[in-house]
Image (spheres, rainbow, N blue to C red):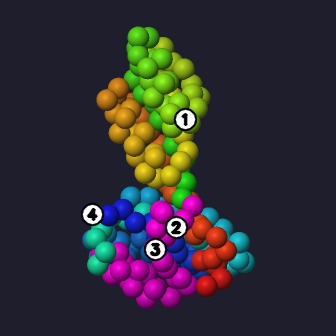
Amino acid sequence: MNKEIIGLLVKNHPGVLLRVTSLFTRRGFNIDSLTVSPAGIEGYSRMTIRISGDDNQVEQFINQMLKIVDVKKAEVLPEDTSVAMELMLIKVSADSSKKNEIIAVTSSYHASLVNLGDHSLTFRASGTPSQIDKLVEELSGYGILEMARTGIAALENGDVCLNTK
């Protein structure tokens, strides 16, 4: 299964998020990440969704999205041709003998230590979805106590805009 980032331009009014997420339920798709923000065009919002699926499922998802009246545009935003970032807070179990080791691991991901507990360390990290996934994988061996991820914000590289195609 691939993890794909989908960009949607939708009308900004009550009920749109429900219509979009209801499609996931009806079609059996799973949402890995969902963010919604103003699109920079009055009356529209931008949704960035990360889903898991093969190429046929992703194509089906895009086609189904475009059938929703409130969805103006829907497209895949490949990670290699887009700017995609995510923010994460992660709390890791850490006794005094492991704290320096954990800090060394997180520094290679440019994560910042934001809280130092007696038996834990909390970090803030931002990066591409794959970078964040790799950091989580590396820290899982130490014992992840809590984690909060914002979801992905993604835009196409260059001058191309979802808003203006």
What residue sits right under mark 1 in the picture? Answer: 111
Amino acid beneath label 4: Met
Q: Is residue 125 visible?
A: yes
Amino acid beneath label 2: Thr
Q: Residue at x 48, y 14 (%)?
A: 118
Callout in the foreground (3, 2): 2
- The circle drawn on residue 15 is none
Task: State how far apart marks 1 and 3 are (Cα).
Answer: 28 Å
What residue sits right under mark 4 in the picture? Answer: 1
Magenta region: 57-83
Q: Which secondary structure lies at badge 2? A: helix
The numbered mark, 1 or 4, whose residue comes first in the sequence reads 4
Are the residues tagged 1 and 4 within 8 Å (C-beta)?
no
Q: Is residue 32 magenta?
A: no
Q: Residue at x 35, y 39 (%)?
A: 137
The numbered mark, 1 or 3, whose residue comes first in the sequence reads 3
Task: State how far apart marks 1 and 4 are (Cα).
Answer: 28 Å
Dot 3 alpha-carbon crowd within 10 angstroms: few under 14, some 14 to 19, many 20 or more? some
Q: Residue at x 64, y 70 (%)?
A: 158
What residue sits right under mark 2 in the picture? Answer: 81
The numbered mark, 1 or 2, whose residue comes first in the sequence reads 2
Task: State how far apart marks 1 and 2 are (Cα).
Answer: 24 Å
What residue sits right under mark 3 in the picture? Answer: 76
Quarter holding residue 39? bottom right
Question: Is 32 on the left or on the right of 14, as rendered?
Answer: left
Q: Is residue 67 magenta?
A: yes
Farthest residue toward the top? 97
Q: Residue at x 42, y 63 (%)?
A: 50
